[in-house]
Amino acid sequence: MIRFYNANILMPDFSIKTGEVHTDGNKISYVGDPKQTDLNFETTVNLNGNLIMPAFKNAHTHSAMTFLRSYADDLPLQQWLFEKIFPMEAKLTPEDVYTLTKLAYAEYLTSGISACFDMYFYPESVSQAAIDTGFRTIMCGSVSGSDSKADIDSALSRLEKFYNTYKNFDKHGLVSYALGFHAEYTTSRPIMEGIAALAEQYKAPVSVHNSETAAEVAGCIERYGKTPTEIFCEIGIYKYGGAGFHCVHMTDNDLNLMKDRGCYVVTNPASNAKLASGIARLSDMSQMGVNLSIGTDGPSSNNALDFFREMYLACVLQKLLKNDAAAMPAEIILKAAFDGGAMGLNNANTIEAGNLADLTVIDLNQPNMQPQNAIVKNIVYSGSKQNIILTMINGKILYKDGEFMTLDTEKLYKEANGIIRRMANDNTNIQ
């Protein structure tokens, strides 16, 4: 059991309450006024008036792409992806993915992130990295392929195998798996139809990159006469919900289809801005009642895994897009940043007894958090990673005051640099 006292607590209605929070195992056991207790706590943490709040949920990422951070910048998405990223990814080994995923976890912890919806290769390696670190990870299927029988059989058999292996959280309560595929433009219709059949068989949601670029949508309309969202719904991909990653170029009909099926739009504003993909219509989505979550996307297209930057951009880009400084209030984006519903994680979004103990602490005693006119506004508009002083996952403190409890970062940095140099055959301008 762990006791946090002398705390400011961010409550579900975004009010601030002075009191304390207790955890028992992996759950929150008490939230309320300070009280005398004879309970035997393993650890007590005096927060000295700092803010304890739910940890962020990174609802779309490619964690192990840390090895391509700043490797292929300042290129348009299609050239970046097909000419630079895919060829390097083909050189990855399972051991590489294990190391590179842990490097991402270190960065997540410093950003107050407790869980990620991770679309990448070698789920065995990702799973082991999550368990060894103590990081909560829901893996998302990433299959793709042509309409050849070999591609169809391979994609569907792999997806179903991994889903059945990992779909239920492991004994640690950390690792799970969701049906998903890369995108319409990399996946043939027969494979998409097979994934829809799996969704029907398991009554399961499906998540996929959706309408990230105008070219993607135009290509889909040329192939099918429909937008990606429309073809997904026609085939049955979204029958049981799921998520669309990016959703930058969405029609009103697309958004209504997402809303009607209870799907999530997962926005990635930093990646979309850096790749010049566009600005998602988050303000419109919010007003229409579409579920919203936030992701960083991968560190090769962002290039940081920083939720403060994502929140700030998610807010201010809407104001620019709508030419309205009142568009997209900070509270809506902060709620989306906590929301794990896109990855099926619904019991860690608020600090309430019985919820998972996935928490983070904001240092309010720094210049960018003073004065405290409006703490929630400060978090979104002036907050930064420098304010994260503690991250707890599943009832365990994994990061505190700049120290990692389960990660050897010096070793990780050395191994990550070795991986990229091995792949590049010492033939690049990496510095």
Image (tube, grey):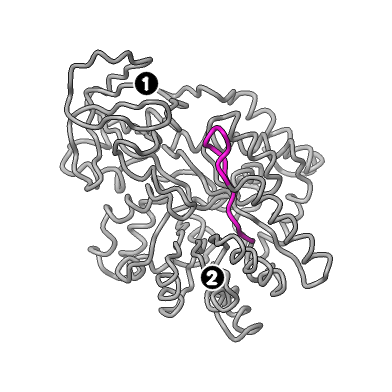
> Residue tagged by mark 1?
1
Residue 361, percent across and down? 33, 32
Who is closer to the viewer here, 372 or 227? Answer: 227
Amino acid of disc 2 = Ser
In the image, what residue occupies the spot 64% across and 68% down?
197
Who is closer to the viewer here, 122 or 166? Answer: 166
Residue 320 falls left or right of residue 422: left
Residue 3, percent across and down? 31, 21
Rendered position, 278 above or below 343: below
Most extreme residue toward the front is 201
Residue 126, percent across and down? 64, 40
Amino acid of disc 1 = Met
Residue 224 falls left or right of residue 379: right
Rendered position, 208 above or below 62: below
Magenta span covers which residues? 168-181
Quarter containing the C terminus: top right
* 390 inside magenta stretch: no
In the image, what residue occupies the spot 60% across and 49% down?
300
Whether residue 299 is visible here, answered yes or no, is no
Say what secondary structure mark 1 lies in.
loop
In the image, what residue occupies the spot 63% across and 43% down?
64
Q: Quadrant of residue 388?
A: top left
| Disc sitting over residue 211 in the figure | 2
